[in-house]
Amino acid sequence: MSLRRTILALLMVLMGLHAAPAQAAAAYQGYVMGYFKESPNQSGDSYALHLAVSSDGLNWMPLNQNNPVATPTAGMQGLRDPYILRKQDGTFVVLATDLKGRVFNLNNQYIHVWDSANLTGFSNYRRVRLHGMNTHSWAPEAFWVPSRNQYAVIYSAHNGTRDVFMVNYTTDFINMGTPQVFFDPGFNVLDGDVLVDGGTFYLAYKNLADGNLYVARSTTGAPNSFTTLTGGLRQGNGIEAPILVKSNTSGTFWLWGDSYSPANAVFYAWQSGNTTNWSAIGQRAFTPPINAKHATISPITAAEQSALVGRWGAPQWNRLKSANFPDRYVRHANNIARIDPFPMDPTADQQWRLVPGLADAAGVSFESVNFPGRYLRHWDYALRLDPNDNTSAFRADATFYRTAGLADGAWASFRSYNFPDRYIRHSGYLLRIDQLSSASAPTARQDATFQVTY
């Protein structure tokens, strides 16, 4: 290293500008998502920390069978809105709202905090106090501010005039400093999310006046330094909890939004190459975890992703997503096989164990997760869920060969074992086996194409 470069490096250390996580961004090859779960009728709610991993940042595999990996034991003993931050030493801190259920009018000056070396375990659980105001501390998030040599913790609160984002600065997530207003555009806002890209700070937020999501930018990350770049973004009727993510492999940015109307626990997404102009991503391109709400996404290395799967385990079930109705998944209802929109209750109606074919181990059979011993089988060409009677006829009816998707070779189609010219397809949202070939109508081939996902 030249003398000039050595001096420059020392100056950067003194100025705090050198600070960067131990893993360089170029080494990141995967993503981790943190979330809590909330189903439409609360039968599958879990106000605790859940984790999922992804290699492409769009399709997610829940860990620990979609069960919690950490649960608060103080305050309201439940969490919403978790946030995962990689600290400057390469370890992680997890922040979350101290709130359980759907009661939102509580005043609470505290948030939950955990430390974690690599997200395979969590330690030093604590509640920390952010302020003394008669208001809440919702959706806490954090980012590193080099010019201060501190972390900024931002959160939604009412400052006595309107809903704004407050900020506290800390070095240890124990001593939280003095709160101050971070972002007050003159109207009520909710759910701030900051992405730091090089020396630029991007802030995504929800405007409570019009219900849309927006993205703002700052060159310093300082309070009240952000300028909004975008027009309002919305898919669905009600959307909140924006997440800004930058691709590990390209200059693409993603913006996720969490829907609460017309359906709860549904995500929508956009992409952009410049953070100013955003285009919607169809639901065919991404699959979030079941019943996930108000998520956080962070880049991780391949080794970290492998360690997370090794610690928490991959799901022992799959879902089947329709190619031409990507908001619908194969499920059983009253023992009839069909495709229905997500979300659905009970959740397990759409979860299947793909086991070796009952009539031929080279094929596959679909065993119900919530009715073990029952399998999808065809009867008079219609698919239904029946108990295995261990007859050769049942085994043959319940066995299918997985092939490249008839409409998309990266997806899958399933050919009947005992009617080899017929494939599983949906018609009027009901599943059946029909005669299909490469010459079949494009719509029919799409009807018979599914993504095997989680």
Image: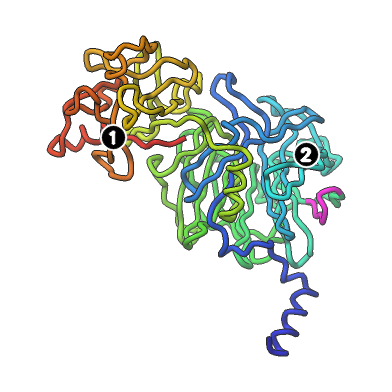
The percent position of residue 31, horizontal first and vertical second, equals 56, 50
Question: Is residue 207 at least partly visible in the picture?
Answer: no
Asked if residue 391 lies left or right of residue 299, the reply is: left
The percent position of residue 375, horizontal first and vertical second, equals 38, 18
- The stretch drawn in magenta includes residue 423: no
Q: Residues within 10 Å of mark 2 (few under 14, many from 20)?
A: many
Decide which of 47, 385 is in the foreground and name it. 385
The colour scheme used to paint the residues is rainbow
Q: Name the residue under label 1.
A: 413
The percent position of residue 425, horizontal first and vertical second, equals 26, 27
* Amino acid tagged 1: Ser
Highlighted range, magenta? 168-174
Label annotation for residue 111: 2
Q: How crowded is mark 1: few (under 14 residues within 10 Å), some or many (20 or more)?
A: many
Decide which of 100, 423 is in the foreground and name it. 423
The percent position of residue 151, horizontal first and vertical second, equals 76, 56
Q: Quadrant of the N terminus?
A: bottom right
Decide which of 283, 278 is in the foreground and name it. 283
